[in-house]
Every structure is written in C-alpha cells, then in structure tokens.
Amino acid sequence: MTDALVLPPAPAARRGTGSVVVTGAAAASAYGRGTEALVSGVLSGRPAFAPVQRFDVSGRRVGFAAAMPGLPELLTEVTRAAGQACDDAGLSPSDRARSPLFLAIHGDPAIARAPEADKPGHGPEAFTAAVAGDCGLAQEGIRCYTSACVAASTAIADAAAIVARGHADRVVVAGGYLVDCDQFALFDAGRVLADDGQVRPFSTGRRGLLLGDGVGAVVIESGESARARRAPPLARLAGWGRTGDAYHPVQPHPEGHGMARAVTAAMQRAGIAAEDLGYINAHGSGTGQSDPAEANALRLALGDAVERVPVSSTKSLHGQSLEASGVLELIVTLLAARKGMLPVNAGFLGTDDRCHLNLVLGEALAVTAEFAMSLNAAFGGANTALVIGLP
Amino acid sequence: MTSPASVASPSLAALSAAAAAAGLTVSASASWPETGTDGEVTPLAGFIESNFSPLLAQVAERALRSRAQPQAPGKVTAIVMVTALGDVTSATCVAAAVDAGKRVSPLLFFQSVPNAVAGYLAARWQLTGPVVCVSGTRAGMDVAALLIDDADADEVLVVRVDLAVTEGDRDCAAAIVLTGPAHGELHRTA
C-alpha cells in the first residue's frame, strides 16, 4: 500500500553558503548528568523508566517515567547544561558575551502557581534572559521557543540557518524538560502514557509514550569561527528541514507528507542522497498513529534506501522530553555516530506491518555513519529533520 | 491593508513595525478587539476554559480572509505564533486541578501547547509550512524572514496573542500575513 504513496511537490530548500558545525554539547537525563552518562546509558540498551517518586501519582492511570533522582530545578539544570556546552566548545567570556541563547522550554514552571500580579514576571523570555545572564551569554537576540516537541529542533534549525547565512557567528541552543506533576496529569488524562511501563516504538503491542527528564545544550557555530578559535567540531550540522502537515490539530498526516518534506529538505541542504544516511534517530513516540505515519514518511522520502538505513527511537530508552527532545536526541545522534555505535530501539515485541523499517534491535549496532538524521514531530502537524555529518 | 480600526491595536502596531524593520511585505492584517465590534471571544469547538486558542484562531482567520487573493496552490504558508506568557489561563487551570486532586479534562491535554490551534488553522487553510511559537515579536519576525529567505515558506502568518493576566487587562491579539520583498532576497544583520 505504501508503494502507491506519492509526495506532493515542494519548493527546493535554500540555505546560506557558510558551513555550520557543533562545537560543544552538554546533557542531563535519567541516566545522569553529562553527555558520557547519556551515551553510555542509551548504548546500554536498558530503558531508564521507573515508578515516579517525584510527585504523587496514586490518582493517575500510569505511574512510570524516566526521571533523575531528587527534585532537580529546570533553571538550575538548563543553566548548568548551557554553561557546560560553552565550556565544551572552549568559549571565552568574550565569545560568550557575543553569543545569543535560543532556549526551548514549555515555560517557566513557576507561572501556573504564581500570584496573579507576579505572573507577568514569569514569562519564557524572562526565564531565557536569566539563563543567558547566568551563563554570561548575550542578552541581545535571545529567543524562547515553546512549539511543543519540535521546540528545540526548530531552534537548532533556525540557529543553523542564521549561521549559514552569516547573520551570526554562533548561537547557543538549549532545551529542558523535567517530569512534572502538571504535564504528567495532562498526558495521563489524554491516555497517551504506556500503562505497561515501556515505550515500544514501531512495535506490535506498543502502549504509548512515557515522559522523561531531558536537558541539553549545543553550541552551533560557523565553520570559519570554529577554525579561527581552533575549536575542533564535534560534528557538522549539515542540513535541516521544518514543515507542517496541514492535516489535524493533534494527529499526524497518516501518509507522513509533512515529515517526508522535512526529511527531503534536510537532505537537500546537506547535499546528500538517502543512500548516504547511516542512521536515523526517529521521532518514534511509541503511539498508535504517529509511528506508522513516520514509517510512511521515511519510505516516501528515502525510497528503497529505507530498507537499509538503521533506525531507532531513543525515546524507548530516555523517554519523551517534550520541548527538549530535539536537542537531547540530536546529542544522542551525534555521540552515537562519533562512537560508531547505534542505540537500540528498545521494548520491541514484534513487527508491525504498518511500520516496516530497518530497526536496530537486540543490542547496539557497530556501524560507521558519516551522516545521521534526527527527526521530531509535534502537535499541530509540525515536523523537523536535522542532519549531522562527522567532521 | 491595515484598516483604521485596527491601527489602535498595540499588538498590530508592534507586528507591523517589526515587519517593516525586517523588510517584509504585509499582505493582510487583523486585530482583536477591533473597535466597536468585538465583545466576547467566539468559542472554538474542542478548546475549553481559556480564550488563548479561540482568540488565536479568530484573529488569524480574520487576517487570512482579508488577503486580496488566496495563496496559490502549491505555495507554502508558515505559522509563527508569538506570545509573551503563553496560555497562562490553561496552565493555571491545570495546576489548580492537580493541587485539588481533581480530574484534569483530556481536552486540556490537547490545548496544553500552542501547536494544537496552529494545526487547526493549518488544516482549514492548507498551511503546509513550519509551525513555530516564540516569545517575542522581534524573534517572531526574524523567524518569519528566515523561513522566506530559505524557501521554507512563500508566505508567513504571524499571530500574536496576549491573554489578560491581571485585573483591568483585556485579552488582545493581532495577525499579519507576510511575504518577502517585491524584489530579491532579504538582507539583514542578526
């Protein structure tokens, strides 16, 4: 059936001529703080889900998430990650002072319970300014993205586009989501949480998603600027695409049209063919409608190469980090490609005929992936694709 | 395209000024409230408790309807939403229910992010471009200009919504439909 799908024509994506690289990264997740904890956690193949201890879930249908121990605070965690990414990139205080911050968050967690008169002081821009200030980053040009599960990936795409066009030498992009009682209640009410405590993307018997702590930051920089600083790139940010489905408020286009166009645009900007992709970190939410739509999108965009490109959704390991997903999963993709080890698509029970993909199953796969792609999708039919290339 | 009635909107004035500064062409615009015509926000099926999504949809459709001509088939329109505090009414409502140990409506799940109403608009008007939400007008305009520059969109619908938060405030919103300059590519510094 999917062979009959045809992707509607779309204009060719353009980009500035400058090269774009990632020169620093930092992360925190249920596997712990630091990129090494994240990559060793996902490559272990052991999902980080456990009963929620952070708040009372006794009235909820589902009680699992992937959370760090204790009561981490979003401002502290995001500030730490952004600062560590700057350190990782070797940015001097004056480099930082010229670098704007693009932050992806749901919002200031304090706003919902703040007294009425204090709410205006808890907007996302004030939160972003506080992070930028604490990290010594520029206040001019800061942005806060709140576009749900594509917030961070959109921020990264925008940062890359700006740098490629020479409008900025460098942008620090950070995102953060920490499992909280309000979002947990909403997702539980929406009946999208997996009641068996596992996320099983593209698998038969999948029961839904589970939330997970996710904090990540990357330094997006022009190749020229990195060379001038003698900063070794972690990867090239080779291509990016973002599109809309124009289909439904909260459901993806079932044939994956929007995501297929995002994948195509990202490959066009990267100047690569489907055969060049060595790994895809899928959106892979583990929900009934989203996974087949994504599989259709990949078949549309990649053609026969979809049979060969290894795919996994690491949401099956670290959970769904909402607005932060795009940056956390780009870091996973980047680190996995650098190590030459691809994380598994955990929780797999059996092949769903609607989701035929070359999934990484059983254990991490040793492979050389010169180019890898990270995909995200969100309510509103929003889709993003990011392509990294090894330096 | 700006009507005399809508000039009074500070949101629309800010959007128009930012569009001009970014070198973008305004092909349609609208605001809420418009003088003497707008009382209560018209409810939107599937969205409850908060005016955020209904207001965003209403002002956006007002702007889209006022375009001199509809978007040509095959052309791509992006949606960029701008809001300083987001849907603070829904967020407050959810927190109150959670703190009281009450059931949270599933409808609040769907409207917990601004993307849902963007998806509603995109489906109704076949807007196949990127969906983005940022916190400031300047950022929203920079995003719009970049999407046009890089051929991610031929046209961008920018909508700003600010709900009343404190006593005496009133919900307000504005929408603007933008295209690139008549000749050539945009040239800006960041």
Image (cartoon, rainbow, N blue to C red):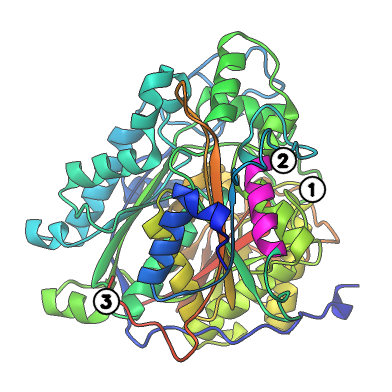
Q: Is residue A207 or residue B9 the one in the foreground?
A: B9
In this rendering, would B111 be left or right of A174? Answer: right
Quadrant position of the N terminus of chain B in the picture: bottom right
Q: According to the image, label 3 marks what residue?
A: A222
Tag 2, which secondary structure?
loop
Return the chain for callout 2. A
> Is disc 2 in contact with disc 1, using a CB cutoff of under 8 Å?
yes
Tell whether position B55 is magenta. yes
In this rendering, would A222 be left or right of A68? Answer: left
In this rendering, would B76 be left or right of A252? Answer: left
Residue B41 pos. (x, y %): 68, 36
The tag earlier along the polypeptide, 2 or 1, is 2
User: Callout 2, which amino acid?
Assistant: Gly
Residue A50 pos. (x, y %): 56, 28
Residue A10 pos. (x, y %): 67, 83
User: Callout 3, which amino acid?
Assistant: Ser
Query: Which residues lie in the magenta part?
Result: B54-65
Residue at horizontal 63 percent and vertical 70 percent from the top? B77
Are the residues flagged by discs 2 and 1 from a single subunit? yes
Q: Can you tell which mark lies on residue A288?
A: 1
